[in-house]
């Protein structure tokens, strides 16, 4: 087997690699490094996430860079700030013993003035995100006229994130004579187009088959009713006591919601998404790398650059739309020769999506059954026993208490003592999973028909507030037309609609909650920007809807209900001073504003705060999630209103549920 000493690398670089424990190159390194050391030909390289692509392109650059020249000689573009920071960190480790070497990271969300000062001091290698790089080019702070290397890392992801225009602008600033290196985990047509337009007869190298999942990952999926998706997630976590993984969600809102529910239910979890500040993101990633938290709930974009080799599981809470994104997700586990598991939670209508992904990545998915209570209890029991066997005893500190302990336990024989000891930790699991329902769904035609019928029950709808009412000339037909115009889903089921004076309520298929909010929130009606939020305001009874009079008074009563019970509070403008449209204006509180200035739930967040809270320090949601379901007496309980016992429990991890 070849090792790094056989490459023509500087002694300083080899010394750094030896200090890092690098002995033999990975397949992509073995193919790319000799080629880049010996040739100036452009290179298009494919390798799975986590296979050492950074060393593959950075070591040859470090070998050939002019350390006496402080001008920028190489620019490396990455899709996210996390990945850019990680690349810079790796390069600095490889160049630890190279004199006069400097690398600089430029990315959004950090002080641009600090980055400009760094540019003025000079750096041979720039690592940046496309957006901030273009910003600095426009400010004439970056000089790319002398670069010899241009690296596009995770090129497929940059295109997925819509950075094509930025890439075009950056490439225009670079000289014609340079070596362009394109590295990607997948090669959709857009990546081939970039290579065709901006590379000169590139050599293509590959470590594995293009767009195929890694061989060290087992792919599993669980079929559940939509209402049981979160309950299934908790059972999957509970049946794997040593789980250390990432839970992927599709939107920022869903990511934060699932993380908050897990924390409230006692799980060692946290969230990572674009609404966090850079300091908050750094803190979360540090805790996850240090295994202070077991479960990281993340969006695809935010997780890029998170370099962790020991993940046991990747859980797809919702499947992505693109098979390439699934490949990136699953490639987070099964690294460094270890076996990983990629788990997908789907409903009965998503079976075809699983088949499509199987066909693209060339891997067979195994359908698993959601664990039953007995199976989970057994796993947790034996995990507890193993933990007891492995615990270290401090004889010196405990010695002074042993006589009293022996005296108090003298009346118990060995068997009885063991039973009582185990029951202290275990009774809560036995109690919680007693008579727990079967969450499994099949994909038979009968179940599909049943799934279609379930759409017409309340539990399969999400109820929304929308800031359009009679004063905006809206009616049920126009509202339905407005919803359909957004192309949220084919044959989207719409439930009850209540039109009031200044605002309205409507119900839509729960499966498309995130898409409904995101698409409608970007729409307008008669020039007015639409605001849509999930609400817990009770809907009117059929008898109320059937009355032919009292509409004005009923509207006032409904607005009072909204102020008292909904997930947001507001006031009503008086007189002729009505602002933009007048009437009811919802107020939302959040210390974290998103880019669209959209309202979101109230939640206090401070840098340095440990969000794996106790039960008395729950996340603050605006709105009551407890809808009349009797709460089991566990710490960190949270009812979700579906009547499902699974919605409320504290699980394995940092604290046990109280019996």
Image: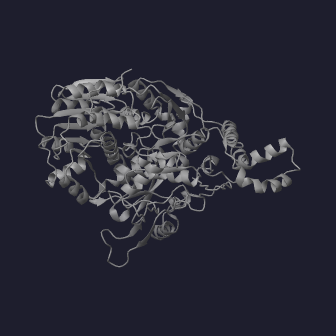
Task: Report the residue at 18% width, 27% height from top.
Answer: 41
Corner quadrant of residue 332: top left
| Residue 641 visible in the picture | yes
Number of marks in the rendered image: 0
Q: Is residue 193 left or right of residue 393?
A: left
Corner quadrant of residue 87: top left
On the image, the x and y values in percent for residue 446 come to 56, 30
Q: Is residue 531 left or right of residue 78?
A: right
On the image, the x and y values in percent for residue 52 come to 36, 33
User: In the image shown, does 320 or 139 lie closer to the viewer?
Assistant: 139
Q: Is residue 59 left or right of residue 21?
A: left
Q: Is residue 244 above or below residue 132?
A: above
Point out the residue furthest to the right here.
Answer: 411
User: In the image shown, does 413 or 469 lie closer to the viewer?
Assistant: 413
Colour approach in the figure: one colour
Q: Is residue 596 left or right of residue 147?
A: right
The N terminus, quarter of image: top left
On the image, the x and y values in percent for residue 214 come to 42, 27
Q: Is residue 96 above or below residue 638?
A: above
Point out the residue furthest to the bottom here.
Answer: 575
User: In the image shown, does 68 or 30 lie closer to the viewer?
Assistant: 68
| Residue 659 visible in the picture | no
Task: Report the residue at 84% width, 44% height from top.
Answer: 416
On the image, the x and y values in percent for residue 15 come to 34, 36
User: In the image shown, does 574 or 193 lie closer to the viewer?
Assistant: 193
């Amino acid at each position: 087997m070849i090792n790094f000493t056989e490459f023509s690398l500087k002694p300083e670089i080899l010394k750094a690699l030896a200090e890092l424990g690098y002995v033999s190159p990975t397949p992509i390194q073995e193919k790319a490094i000799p080629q880049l050391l010996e040739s100036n030909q452009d290179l298009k390289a494919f390798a799975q996430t986590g296979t050492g692509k950074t060393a593959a392109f950075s070591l040859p650059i470090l070998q050939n860079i002019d350390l006496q020249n402080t001008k920028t000689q190489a620019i490396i573009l990455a899709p996210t700030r996390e990945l850019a920071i990680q690349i810079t960190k790796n390069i600095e480790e490889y160049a630890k013993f190279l004199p006069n070497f400097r690398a600089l990271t430029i990315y959004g969300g950090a002080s641009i003035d600090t980055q400009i000062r760094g540019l003025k001091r000079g750096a041979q290698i720039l690592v940046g995100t496309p957006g901030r790089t273009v910003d600095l080019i426009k400010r004439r702070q970056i000089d790319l006229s002398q670069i010899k290397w241009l690296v596009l890392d995770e090129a497929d992801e940059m295109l997925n994130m819509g950075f094509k225009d930025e890439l075009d602008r950056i490439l225009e600033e670079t000289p014609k004579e340079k070596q362009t290196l394109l590295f990607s985990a997948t090669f959709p047509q857009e990546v081939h187009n970039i290579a065709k337009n901006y590379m000169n007869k590139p050599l293509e190298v590959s470590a594995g088959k293009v767009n195929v999942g890694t061989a060290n990952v087992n792919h599993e999926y669980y079929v559940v009713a939509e209402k049981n998706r979160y309950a299934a997630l908790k059972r999957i976590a509970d049946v794997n006591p040593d789980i250390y993984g990432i839970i992927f969600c599709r939107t920022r809102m869903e990511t934060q919601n699932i993380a908050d529910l897990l924390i409230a239910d006692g799980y060692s979890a946290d969230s990572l998404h674009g609404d966090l500040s850079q300091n908050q993101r750094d803190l979360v990633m540090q805790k996850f790398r240090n295994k202070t938290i077991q479960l990281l709930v993340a969006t695809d974009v935010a997780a890029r650059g998170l370099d962790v080799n020991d993940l046991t599981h990747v859980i797809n809470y919702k499947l992505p739309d693109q098979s390439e994104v699934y490949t990136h997700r699953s490639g987070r586990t099964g690294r460094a020769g270890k076996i990983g598991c990629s788990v997908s939670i789907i409903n009965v209508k998503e079976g075809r999506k699983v088949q499509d992904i199987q066909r693209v990545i060339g891997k067979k998915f195994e359908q698993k059954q959601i664990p039953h209570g007995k199976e989970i209890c057994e796993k947790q029991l034996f995990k507890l026993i193993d933990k007891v066997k492995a615990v270290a005893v401090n004889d010196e500190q405990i010695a002074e208490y042993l006589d009293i302990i022996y005296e108090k336990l003298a009346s118990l024989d060995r068997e009885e003592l063991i039973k009582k000891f185990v029951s202290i930790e275990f009774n809560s699991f036995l109690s919680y999973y007693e008579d727990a329902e079967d969450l499994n769904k099949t994909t038979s035609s009968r179940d599909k028909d049943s799934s279609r019928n379930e759409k017409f029950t309340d539990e399969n709808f999400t109820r929304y507030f929308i800031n359009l009412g009679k004063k905006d000339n809206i009616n049920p037909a126009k509202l339905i037309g407005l919803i359909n115009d957004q192309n949220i889903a084919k044959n989207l089921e719409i439930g009850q609609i209540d039109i009031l004076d200044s605002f309205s309520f409507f119900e839509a298929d729960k499966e498309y909650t995130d898409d409904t909010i995101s698409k409608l929130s970007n729409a307008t009606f008669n020039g007015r920007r639409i605001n849509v939020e999930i609400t817990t305001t009770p809907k009117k009874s059929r008898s109320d809807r059937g009355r032919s009079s009292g509409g004005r008074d009923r509207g006032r009563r409904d607005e009072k209900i909204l102020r008292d019970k909904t997930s947001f509070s507001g006031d009503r403008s008086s007189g002729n001073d009505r602002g933009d449209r007048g009437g009811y204006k919802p107020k939302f509180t959040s210390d974290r504003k998103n880019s669209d200035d959209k309202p979101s739930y109230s939640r206090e967040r401070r840098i340095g705060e440990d969000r794996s809270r106790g039960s008395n320090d729950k996340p603050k949601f605006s709105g009551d999630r407890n809808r009349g379901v009797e709460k089991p007496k566990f710490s960190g309980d949270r009812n979700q209103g579906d009547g499902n016992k699974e919605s409320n429990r504290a699980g394995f991890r940092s604290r046990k549920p109280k019996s």
